[in-house]
Amino acid sequence: MSALLLILVAGSLVEAGGSRTLVVCNDTTDPVSLDPHREFDASSDNTINQIFDGLVRLTPEGKVAPALAQSWRRLDDMTVEFYLRRKVVFHNG
């Protein structure tokens, strides 16, 4: 039920030939790459953000916010120490 509610909130209803159609994603371009270190286009970025989690994320205002890391501190000019959320598990695919 909550997944359906999320889809209904995230999507939009549009008229298509007299019927109502739920449009969830209107991105018609294939991603150029699924490598987060090599993508620089919006289509790849949209797909990658649904697959990978980062240590931090950018808010709509452009500020850095926690993601996998709950907090962090700079140790020196070249080193940052991240404190991860509990129960975060890494894997190699």
Image: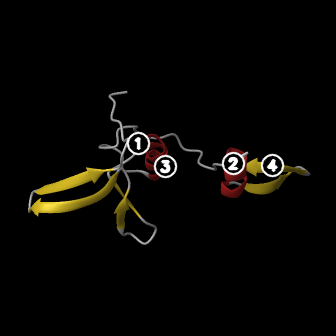
For marks 1 and 2, the one nearer the N-term is: 2
Q: What residue type is labelled 1?
A: Phe
From this view, report whether residue 27 is shown above or below residue 57. above
In the rendered structure, find residue 52 and report the number of the disc placed on it: 1
Q: Are marks 3 and 2 in contact (CB under 8 Å)?
A: no
For marks 3 and 1, the one nearer the N-term is: 3
Label 3 environment density (alpha carbons within 10 Å; few <14, some 14–19, many ≥20): few
Coordinates of residue 77 in the picture (x, y in percent): 8, 62
Give the residue number, with chain letter if any, for mark 2.
2
Give the residue number, with chain letter if any, for mark 4.
21
| Drawn side of residue 77 relative to residue 85, left or right | left
Q: Which amino acid does label 3 sit on?
A: Asn
Label 3 element class: helix
**Number of numbered labels in the structure image:** 4
- Circle nearer the viewer, 3 or 1: 1
Coordinates of residue 2 in the picture (x, y in percent): 69, 48
Residue 57, picture quadrant: bottom left
The quarter of the rendered structure image containing the C terminus is: top left
Q: Which amino acid does label 2 sit on?
A: Ser
